[in-house]
Image (cartoon, rainbow, N blue to C red):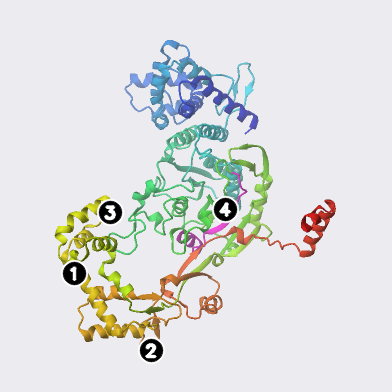
Amino acid sequence: MDNKVHNQIVSFIWGIADDVLRDVFVRGKYRDIILPFTVLRRLDALLVPTKEKVLEAVEFMKQNQIDDLSALKSQTGYPFWNTSKFTFESLLNDSDNIDSNLEVYLDGYSPNVQEIISKFKLRNQLETMKENEITYLLIEKFASKEINVSPNEALNGKGDKMPPLTNLGMGYVFEELIRKFNEENNEEAGEHFTPREIIKLMTHILFLPVKDQINKGTHLIYDPACGSGGMLTEAEQFALEVTKNKASFLLYGQEVNPETFAICTSDMLIKGEKPENIAFGSTLSKDGFSNLHFDFMLSNPPYGKTWKLDENAIVDNRGKKGSGENAENIKDPRFQVGLPTISDGQLLFLMNMVSKMKHNTELGSRIATVHNGSALFTGDAGGGESEIRKHIIENDWLDCIIALPKNIFYNTGIPTYVWIVNNRKPANRKGKVQLINALELYVKLRKNLGDKNCEMTAEHIDQITKLYMDFEESDISKIFPNEYFGYNKITVERPLRLSAQFTEEALKTLRFDKSIADEMAWAYEKFGDDVYTKLKDLKPDIEKHLAKHEIKLKAAQKKNLFSQEFWIAQLEVLNNSTKLMNIIGTEQHDDFNTFSVLFTDTIKNEKLKLDNKAQKAIINAIIWKNEDAEAVIKKTEKDGTIVYEADGDLRDTENVPLDEDIQTFFEREVLQHVPDAWIDHKKTVKGYEISFTRYFYNYVPPRSIEEITAEILQLEQETDGILNEIVND
């Protein structure tokens, strides 16, 4: 589309907002009027040439009591119609009744356009327009002959030809208007706007490699976050071009935003596509095409956005471990592989597309989708993100990832990447993934558009496409086997080492139960031994203390705090522990294995009444970790192998590349530093991540001392010895 024409149309429509809506609507509401009226003007322009024929047909249907108006499509040449006598221009002929006539005009549209009007919520604005008497001026502006928003050529007021505004051009206009309205409203600029050069790059790589394999017949193209439909429009246009129209394509999409859904649907109507192929609602929670599979899929899904609103439709008890009815249950089969964190649902969109790949055709399915960097590496091994990457890579579907230039999108300057997923890799690509670093392939814009300060030229797109199709390595193209991105996350354990020693100071804490130690300690300090004999009388004072300090206790804790028997039982634990100290002594034991036997035998021999909970409380009071103590033995196997207790504080993990033997890595990287370590193989988990920075890192050696010295001396000469004077001073 000609940039000059595009800018003229955007400026004209933007001018309508300032001229007509100012002081009537707040600036953030301008879009609620401008966008739907732009759509209606475009539809209206298409229906004007057949208006008389349609009215005649409507009269005929009334006379013959025909309720089904779908035959009007044959009169208009489009899958929509308007049965009212009005057009935008004729509405201006009756200024006194323009508001009521506008409602008649809107009511005259076919059901598919009624849905568009409904999604825009346009009728909600009509009363405000009427009260402020701006309806006439607004329609007069949109009916102007100075712009052409029709897909057909038109004449301006001077009789000069104005070029048609194609569907693709209309997409440009809409998305530029949306961007400007969002900026005015301090919203995220360009939320639905994918730069056209990125779409062209995606379509080139989707279709060019398989253009000779696309046979006659109908192929399905799908975008699960289609916005105003720009990607679908561009994909179909390019596919028809490269296949020389030998195949046909059907477009499918889904959009959650009612405004952009309406724009996309109107675009499909004008093109003669089936508007019912654009589903409304969240792709994640309400799959609009659960029974369909697609040949080509492309998308720029939202990233860094929560999927909290979709959670209930996708999963029960998210994140809960274990089994049973209270454990996590992923209900949607599209996402069975794993779920990303609730704060970012972009990989769910990818899995939605993966679930819709065709596996029973020669062509299979090809996917191009944009993601930010977090999709490459966030999530630990075994986590949802890693499991999704693992699923795609181990099925050998990940074909290529392209790193895009920074600041190439309108609403973000963060790094972005195009993923190419393909379940029909040619032989030379099988088992491999290509990475293309296109970070430096751009030209600067003369004027920024939001955060966008650069763009890719046609030459850049051709260069990247050639790199992909040639499948050869270069300074910006790397090829790795699938396994290169995988690793085994091993858990490295070290033995627990404990020392034990009875001391009066350590045993003091046993007077109080650990769960309510602060409350019991306050009561004992306040009331002394009365807590063992007069607790009932002390209860009001203790309750006042709890209320004053806003101390919230669970029911069981409160019951224990006010139980005379509980206090006496704790005192008994303290007394018995003192007996143990008197028998065992106060020397330090650095071998907990022998001390544990001594502790248990003494309790048994002295017939002390200490249950398991009490014994554990005493042990916890008198032990501490000591790296110089003996390792604590958990058990001895039948073959004599000793299994040690693991120290959770010393537990560590290591990522071992899939192409390296775990034991060899462990001996080299771990054992030589910590000889007592071992691997808990039951906890080993496989993960996948992709790090562009590491793969394309170019080492720049530091300058030599000689170079730095020479530079300093040169600087000294240039400053006439000032540096030397400073140093000497």
Residue assigned mark 3: 551
Q: Are there few (<14), some (14-19), or many (20+) residues within 10 Å of tag 3?
A: few
Q: Amino acid at mark 4?
A: Gln
Q: Are there few (<14), some (14-19), or many (20+) residues within 10 Å of tag 4?
A: few
Disc 3, disc 4: CB below 8 Å?
Answer: no
Between marks 2 and 1 in the image, the one whose residue lies nearer the viewer? 1
Q: Amino acid at mark 3?
A: Ile
Q: What SS does tag 1 mark? A: helix
Q: Residue at horizontal 40%, vertical 17%? A: 131
Q: Nearer the N terminus, badge 3 or badge 4?
A: 4
Residue 517 appears anywhere in the view: yes
Q: Are there few (<14), some (14-19), or many (20+) residues within 10 Å of tag 1?
A: some
In depth, the one of 275 and 308 nearer the eye is 308
Q: Are there few (<14), some (14-19), or many (20+) residues within 10 Å of tag 2?
A: few
> Is 392 within the magenta?
yes
Total marks shown come to 4
Q: Nearer the N terminus, badge 1 or badge 3?
A: 3
Magenta stretch: give its range.
Answer: 387-408
Q: Amino acid at mark 1?
A: Ile
In space, the residues marked 2 and 1 are separated at their CA atoms by 47 Å
Q: Residue at horizontal 60%, vertical 45%? A: 407
> Is 471 within the magenta?
no
Mark number displayed over residue 639: 2
Disc 3, disc 2: CB below 8 Å?
Answer: no
Q: What SS does tag 2 mark? A: loop
Residue assigned mark 4: 213
Between marks 1 and 4 in the image, the one whose residue lies nearer the viewer? 1
In the drawing, does residue 522 fall left or right of residue 591?
Answer: left
Task: State the image coordinates of residue 724 (x, y, percent, origin top left).
Answer: 81, 56
| Quadrant that contains the N terminus | top right
Residue assigned mark 1: 568
